[in-house]
Amino acid sequence: MPTKTFFNLNAEKQNSIYEALYQEFSQSALSEAKVSSIVLVANIPRGSFYTYFDSLIDAYQWVLKAVLTDIHHDINQRNFLLSAELFISKAQESKHFDFLSKYYIVNEALLEHESSQSYHKKVFPTLTADATPIEIENWLLSKSIHQLIRAFFLNPDEKQNIILTLHTLSNWKKEV
């Protein structure tokens, strides 16, 4: 996450840095992203980058959090399966499509490997032995939805089959 120094910058400069990060991470996998490209687009000295972020991964996680917040804004809290279907249906027209493609195809695995405090360990904790049936159902649905969204980004041509799978899950949920 950005440092206190970053938040002391004016909003225009913060936005410029965010946009440079977003552009780089939408075009390049995290393992190939370059601070030199980011600072050039943001028009900041290279050394300043490290006064604003601890690392490139730190900067990526900040941008990822903003993107996920934007995407989750439209989620129907009562019907995650329908929300996933709508998201997949519109994903290719989303302003975040390139960023999310890089995330699901490459960066998600890199983050899992690099960070013991990864996003997914927070979102998808392991089940405990005393989990209730509803906790198990919600966990299974969360895992399934995430995997189907990832499958879509890995192979967008499978969109219709993935949506059919979401419908199957929806029908199953009605029966349990």
Image: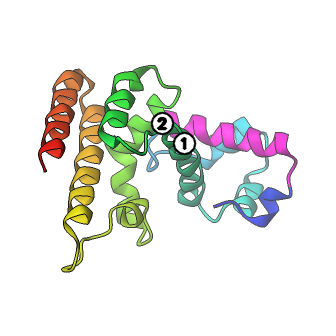
| Residue placed most toward the observer, 46 or 134 | 134
Distance between the alpha carbons at the discs numbered 2 and 1: 9 Å
| Residue placed most toward the observer, 148 or 98 | 148
Residue under numbered circle 1: 67
Please check the rendered image and state whether residue 153 is part of the magenta-colored stretch, yes or no.
no
Residue under numbered circle 2: 99
The residue depicted at 50 percent of the width and 32 percent of the height is 96
The residue depicted at 63 percent of the width and 61 percent of the height is 1
Residue 50 horizontal/vertical position (percent): 70, 61
Which amino acid type is shown beneath numbered disc 2? Phe
| Residue 34 as seen in the image, left or right of residue 14 | left
| Residue 53 as seen in the image, left or right of residue 83 | right
Mark 1 falls on what kind of element?
A: helix
| Residue 158 as seen in the image, left or right of residue 51 | left
* Stretch in magenta: 9-27
| Residue placed most toward the observer, 172 or 147 | 172
Residue 81 horizontal/vertical position (percent): 29, 39
Residue 83 horizontal/vertical position (percent): 37, 35
User: Circle 1: is it few (<14), some (14-19), or many (20+) Cα within 10 Å?
Assistant: some
In the figure, 99 relative to 45: above or below? above
Which amino acid type is shown beneath numbered disc 1? Val
